[in-house]
Image (cartoon, helix red, strand yellow):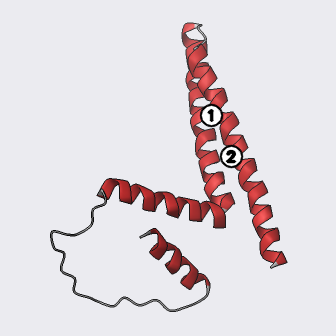
Amino acid sequence: MAISAETISEATAKGLKITEVPISAIYTGDGSTLNPVKHGASVLNRVMVMISERRPLLFFGTAGVISIILGIAAGVVVLKALFTINELAVGTAMVAILLITVGVLFVFAGVILNVLVKRLRDSL
């Protein structure tokens, strides 16, 4: 299934027309031996890798922005606790700092990888 997603992506990138052709299939007791959850997770993993390779700014930038937003929300909780009950929520403050730091690193990684992918495409 992961290969079919990559094949469809390649065909679309090259401007090929994709049509669906109905088929009839009969599955017997000797069908797939793969665990559907494990197989679905592996397909999703491959699609995510494909997105991160082709559109690194979108992939890492989105994850980074989400992490930054969660970090800011945790920071607001810390500030609210600090001003209302005069106590510093140290654990939540550490989580906020961690989320913001990871988010910034993800955004920068996305920008750097995006530049590298563009340079690689231009050299081909």
- At x 82%, y 76%, the residue is 122
48 sits to left or right of 35: right
- At x 66%, y 53%, the residue is 61
First-in-chain label (1 vs 2):
1
Residue 120 percent across, percent down from the top left = 79, 70
Residue 47 percent across, percent down from the top left = 51, 64
- At x 58%, y 45%, the residue is 66
Q: Amino acid at mark 1?
A: Leu
- Quarter of the image that includes the N terminus: bottom left
- Residue where numbered disc 1 is placed: 99
- At x 65%, y 67%, the residue is 54
Residue 44 percent across, percent down from the top left = 45, 59
In front of the other: 60 or 26: 26
- Residue where numbered disc 2 is placed: 106
Q: Does 57 sit above or below residue 107?
A: below
- Quarter of the image that includes the C terminus: bottom right
